[in-house]
Amino acid sequence: MDRSNDHVARVRAARDVAQREMESFGDVSEYDITMIRGQLREEPAPGSQPALDFNPQEHD
């Protein structure tokens, strides 16, 4: 991993790696493309931890 402070060089190197990875998959027309779209929930999802009742007078 490159730990240099030259962010431009790091971005360019990452872009080159990503480009090689994308090219390794071959022609895009050979694949089926599926788009998945989600919807926002109307109500928030419940938390996994119950609420903690805090009474500040008990700790004085």
Image (cartoon, helix red, strand yellow):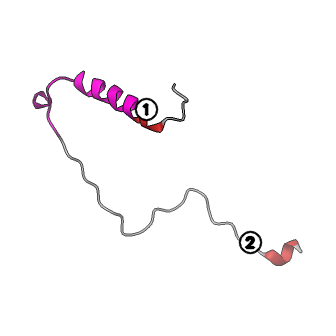
Residue 10 horizontal/vertical position (percent): 44, 32
Residue 27 horizontal/vertical position (percent): 14, 26
User: Looking at the image, is 51 positioned above or below residue 6?
Assistant: below
Q: Which residue is mark 2?
A: 54
- Is 53 on the left or on the right of 59, as rendered? left
Q: Amino acid at mark 1?
A: Ala
Q: Is residue 49 magenta?
A: no
Q: Secondary structure at mark 1?
A: helix
Which of pointers 1 and 2 indicates the residue nearer the eye? 1
Q: Which mark is residue 55?
A: none
Q: Which residue is mark 1?
A: 9
Residue in the image at 18% along x and 42% along y: 34
Residue closest to the far right:
60
Taken as a whole, is the magenta stretch helix, strand or loop?
A: helix
Residue in the image at 11% along x and 27% along y: 30
42 vs 28, nearest the viewer? 28
Q: Earlier in the sequence, mark 1 or mark 2?
A: 1
Q: Secondary structure at mark 2?
A: loop
Q: Amino acid at mark 2?
A: Phe
Splitting the image into 4 quarters, where does residue 15 fall? top left
Residue in the image at 36% along x and 64% along y: 41
- Is 5 on the left or on the right of 41, as rendered? right
- Is 7 on the left or on the right of 31, as rendered? right
Q: Which residues are magenta?
A: 12-33
Label 2 crowd (10 A; few <14 / some 14-19 / many >=20): few
Q: Is residue 24 magenta?
A: yes
Residue closest to the far bottom:
57
Please tell me how many numbered marks the rendered image carries.
Answer: 2
User: Looking at the image, is 49 positioned above or below residue 14?
Assistant: below
Residue in the image at 42% along x and 37% along y: 8
Marks 1 and 2 sit apart, C-alpha to C-alpha, by 51 Å
